[in-house]
Image: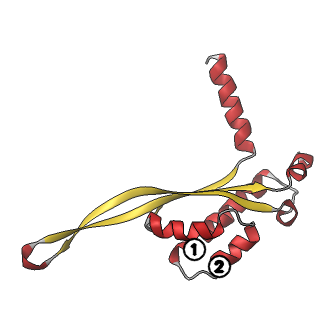
Amino acid sequence: MGSRKRNTSEQKKEAAKTRYQAVLRNCPTSPRKMRLVTDLINGKEVNKALDILKFSSQEASRRLEKLLLSAIANWQAKNEGVRVEESNLFIKTVHVDSGRVLKRLQTAPQGRAYRLKKRSNHVTLVLDSMNKEVENTSK
């Protein structure tokens, strides 16, 4: 392996140590419906976002709540000994991308058929901490 490749791979590994994320793949909800929920929590503090998702009536909020709890667990795995309440975690970014589309047929009158598109999505949730010095002292 060349030195340039080695250096860039080491930089990516270092960046991954300070990146706290969770990814949800092939969620059987349309991306448009999921974006409505993600726009509610983007940039909010973690506890406030959990409250918003818990009391939201949309189905996508349940899946997003589990994803947020997974991202918090990933943060705790990388920062042992630091409490979540003291770190001031907030949602840095939430990306909703289109997933695979299942194409189906629905019977229609007079021997015809209508096409149905069952859409899915991929959600990437990234957390960040407002207190960078708390994380540096724990290492």
Q: Which disc is residue 61 wearing?
A: 1
Q: Quadrant of residue 64?
A: bottom right
Classify mark 1: residues with Cα within 10 Å, few (<14), some (14-19) or many (20+): many
Q: Is residue 34 left or right of residue 131?
A: left
Classify mark 2: residues with Cα within 10 Å, few (<14), some (14-19) or many (20+): some
Q: How is the image coloured?
A: secondary structure
Q: Earlier in the sequence, mark 1 or mark 2?
A: 2
Q: Which disc is residue 83 wearing?
A: none
User: Residue 100's spot in the image, x, y percent?
Assistant: 38, 56
User: Residue 127's spot in the image, x, y percent?
Assistant: 71, 56
Say which residue label 2 marks: 54
Q: Which quadrant does the N terminus fall into? A: top right
Q: Quadrant of residue 68?
A: bottom right
- Can residue 24 be seen at all in this image of the molecule? no
Q: Is residue 19 left or right of residue 95?
A: right
- Can residue 31 be seen at all in this image of the molecule? yes
